[in-house]
Amino acid sequence: MSYRSLDPAHIVKTIERLQERIDSRFPNAGLGRVCGELLATAHIAIGKAAQLSERNWPLRIAIGLILLLGLAAQVAAAQFLNFDGMEANVGVLQSLEAAVNLLILFGGAAWFLLTLEERLKRQRALDALHELRSLAHVIDMHQLTKDPTVVLESQRTPASPERSMTPFELTRYLDYCAEMLSVTGKLAALFADRVRDSVVIEAVNDIETLTNGLGRKIWQKITIVGALEQSGH
């Protein structure tokens, strides 16, 4: 077992254990179902990340054949550009211009084909990362109304949401949300390990920044709940 890279199997085990803990503590809470979605998304993301790390040999072979045919076409076209016997400078310039245009077009087509696999992988990675980003916001929504005022029943208003959790239960609930956000960031990091693309790495960093920021807000709530309990409220 390597300790220098993330192990997808361990990430899945962590989510499975987390879902068991949530279901045991809050059997009727929607957070357990969200964790189930996180587990399903983890299986899909791990599979996609593994596929992206593999070389697409059929595509590479097809591109190689197309480039060989294109090169052969360039050689054949060059045979028609015969500069011998040309007395007019205009004819020479026209032939040179045609040859340069052919080389530019071939170079552009070759670059497009050579970077096609990378761009396809990038798009697939960004699609998977978008799902993880959306899931992070769903997790954040589940902790949005779970604020420290649960221990200040005297401060309730008629519009206040129903709060039936004890301070200990609230702390555990918020802790589970923070763990789910952390795991979401680790799933995103798998794509940075498998795809060495600057755009993908930047997207991964954005998700990790998002999950870390949301996690910090949750831990601020946990700290406030602990402080209120110690003060006797």
Image: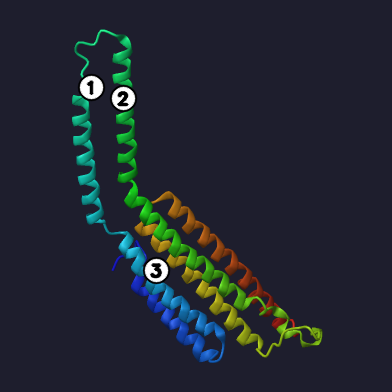
Q: Circles 2 and 1: CB distance less than 8 Å?
A: yes
Q: Quadrant of the C terminus?
A: bottom right
Q: Viewed as shown, does residue 141 lie left or right of 123? A: right
Give the CA separation, mark 3 to mark 1. Answer: 53 Å
Residue 154 position by quadrant:
bottom right
- Of the numbered discs 3 and 2, the one sitting upstream in the chain is 3
Q: Which residue is mark 1?
A: 81
> In the structure shown, which secondary structural element does the residue marked by tag 3 occupy?
helix
Camera-side residue of 63 and 215: 63
- Identity, as a three-letter code, of the amino acid under mark 2: Ala
Residue 84 in the image: state x and y as whole percent: 19, 13
> What's the distance in space between the residues labelled 2 and 1, CA to CA?
9 Å
Tag of residue 98: 2
The front one of 55 and 81 is: 81
Q: What residue is disc 3 on?
A: 45
- SS at circle 2: helix
Residue at 59% across, 64% down: 213
Is there a contact, CB below 8 Å, between mark 3 and mark 1?
no
The span from disc 3 to disc 2 (Cα, nearest Å) is: 49 Å
Are circles 3 and 2 on residues that touch, CB within 8 Å?
no
Q: Could you tell me the amino acid type at mark 1?
A: Leu
Is residue 7 visible from the viewing direction of this image? no
Which of labels 3 and 2 is toward the front? 2
Up the image or down, 47 lies above or below 29; here it is above
Secondary structure of the residue carrying numbered label 1: loop
Q: Quadrant of residue 151?
A: bottom right
